[in-house]
Image: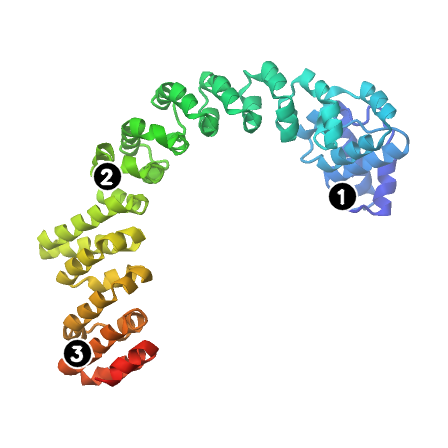
């Protein structure tokens, strides 16, 4: 914020106040300054601009404004002031730096440390380490953390805040060793956040303790966060445990986030575990709404089985139930993986044709699969032209899409069937769509 000359003149009166910028005088100094501005009918300015300008005028007077770290509790943002002070300090000759540092209180040095150039941070790291100031250590550059990680851990390995702050700078072996600190705290924030940093041996070592914490009465974290970051090699062994945890949570009276508890569990369950006995048992314990939400996270083999089950349910159901089941089938076809269509196209086309639902399959089916099965689709349309037309279906939409996919022979057969089924009134529009394909023209001319 740019200050006016009038504002600066008022501020300059306060540069040498006794106890200036001491915590116990901080608020009164600023209040007096704002009052003085008001008396002169000068628009008030924000605290950070006041402190920055106070620092500047005091520096000009030959005095460094000492910005204490705990002032932040009073003032919303001192970053600009701290940055300028750090720049001034970095610009001093080496001898002047040393002399200035000897007089500079630790809390003030800590407040400007993160704004100093890397070389100066590295040079004076011992002073920070001697004080073991958590927020300062956490905000160190990653390279400095890595260079001094053993020293940091020796002094702060029992502090979960600092340990979490340097976690990414630690080797896997060190993480496996120090993860016990998070276990001891019983604070789910720390052990959930840092679980992914362990090796497979580290996760194997602590998993039973983690499960004990997840099942404790006072646990209120997100157990799926542990599951998401568990190594795939361990998930087969522990899936049943986490699935039971999910069912207990979902069926409890607690409402927070339980709607999506199965989605997140299943999304991070590898295919081989989904296909296992425990995996199959899990999905068949879900109710209709839960199963519909996890379907998109299900592997293609199980999706195929679920779609087949829905088709069979539809065929065996009475008229009243068919509407709900067909909605389920539509949603499954919409969310099915491409591999489901690749593996099962013939079965799906045949089964869905039997229940007058094959056009939905064609709508959701990937183009590459449609092109591979052009001949089958052509025969399907030829068989069902009259039924589709008389049933009021919008043939234009279907044929507009199919004409770009069907091979020339299938296009020709369909147009010929229009004549054979006495659908002459539709033949010109459909022919126009098919004739847009060069490969179809010669065959169609011969009809």
Comes first in the chain, label 3 or label 2: 2
Please name the residue that numbered disc 3 is placed on. Answer: 417
Q: CA distance from mark 1 to mark 2?
A: 64 Å
In the rendered image, residue 274, in percent from the top left (x then y), is placed at 27, 37
Residues at circles 1 and 2 in contact by the CB criterion of under 8 Å:
no
Instruction: Give how far across and how far down residue 242 sits, in percent.
Output: 31, 29
Residue 427 position in % (x across, y down): 23, 83
Lower sequence index among marks 1 and 2 = 1
Q: Earlier in the sequence, mark 1 or mark 3?
A: 1
Q: Residues within 10 Å of mark 3 (few under 14, many from 20)?
A: many
Alpha carbons under labels 3 and 2: distance apart: 45 Å
Q: Is residue 211 visible?
A: yes
> Looking at the rendered structure, which numbered label has been put on residue 44?
1
Instruction: Place residue 130 in its image quadrant.
Output: top right
What label sits on residue 283 in the rendered view? Answer: 2
Q: In the displayed structure, would residue 265 be above or below residue 305?
A: above
Q: Is residue 209 left or right of residue 185?
A: left
């Amino acid at each position: 914020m740019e200050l006016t000359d009038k504002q600066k003149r008022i501020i300059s009166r306060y540069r040498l106040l006794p106890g200036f910028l001491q915590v116990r005088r901080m608020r009164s100094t600023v209040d007096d300054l704002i009052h003085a501005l008001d008396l002169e009918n000068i628009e008030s300015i924000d605290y950070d601009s006041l402190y920055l300008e106070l620092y500047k005028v005091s520096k000009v007077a030959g005095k460094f404004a000492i910005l204490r770290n705990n002032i932040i509790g009073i003032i919303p943002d001192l970053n600009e002031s701290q940055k300028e002070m750090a720049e001034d300090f970095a610009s001093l000759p080496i001898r002047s730096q040393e002399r200035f540092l000897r007089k500079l209180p630790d809390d003030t040095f800590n407040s400007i440390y993160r704004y100093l150039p890397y070389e100066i941070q590295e040079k004076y790291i011992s002073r920070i380490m001697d004080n073991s100031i958590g927020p300062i250590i956490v905000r160190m550059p990653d390279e400095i953390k890595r260079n001094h990680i053993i020293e940091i851990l020796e002094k702060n390995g029992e502090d979960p805040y600092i340990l979490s702050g340097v976690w990414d700078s630690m080797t896997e072996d060190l993480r496996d060793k120090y993860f016990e600190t998070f276990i001891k705290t019983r604070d789910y924030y720390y052990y959930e956040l840092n679980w992914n940093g362990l090796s497979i041996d580290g996760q194997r070592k602590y998993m039973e303790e983690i499960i004990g914490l997840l099942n404790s009465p006072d646990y209120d974290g997100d157990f799926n966060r542990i599951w998401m970051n568990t190594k795939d090699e361990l998930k087969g062994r522990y899936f049943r445990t986490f699935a039971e945890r999910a069912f207990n949570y979902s069926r409890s009276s607690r409402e927070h986030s339980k709607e999506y508890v199965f989605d997140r569990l299943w999304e991070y369950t590898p295919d081989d575990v989904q296909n296992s006995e425990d995996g199959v048992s899990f999905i068949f314990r879900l109710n209709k709404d839960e199963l519909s939400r996890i379907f998109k996270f299900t592997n293609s083999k199980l999706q195929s089985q679920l779609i087949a089950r829905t088709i069979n349910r539809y065929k065996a159901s009475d008229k009243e139930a068919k509407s709900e089941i067909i909605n389920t089938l539509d949603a499954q076809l919409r969310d099915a993986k491409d591999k489901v269509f690749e593996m099962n196209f013939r079965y799906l086309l045949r089964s869905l044709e039997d229940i007058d639902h094959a056009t939905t399959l064609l709508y959701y089916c990937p183009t590459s699969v449609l092109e591979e099965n052009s001949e089958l689709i052509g025969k399907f349309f030829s068989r069902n032209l009259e039924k589709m037309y008389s049933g009021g279906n919008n043939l234009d939409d279907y044929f507009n899409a199919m004409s770009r996919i069907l091979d020339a022979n299938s296009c020709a057969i369909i147009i010929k069937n229009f004549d054979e089924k006495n659908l002459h009134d539709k033949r010109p529009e459909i022919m126009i769509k098919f004739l847009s394909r060069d490969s179809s023209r010669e065959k169609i001319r011969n009809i």
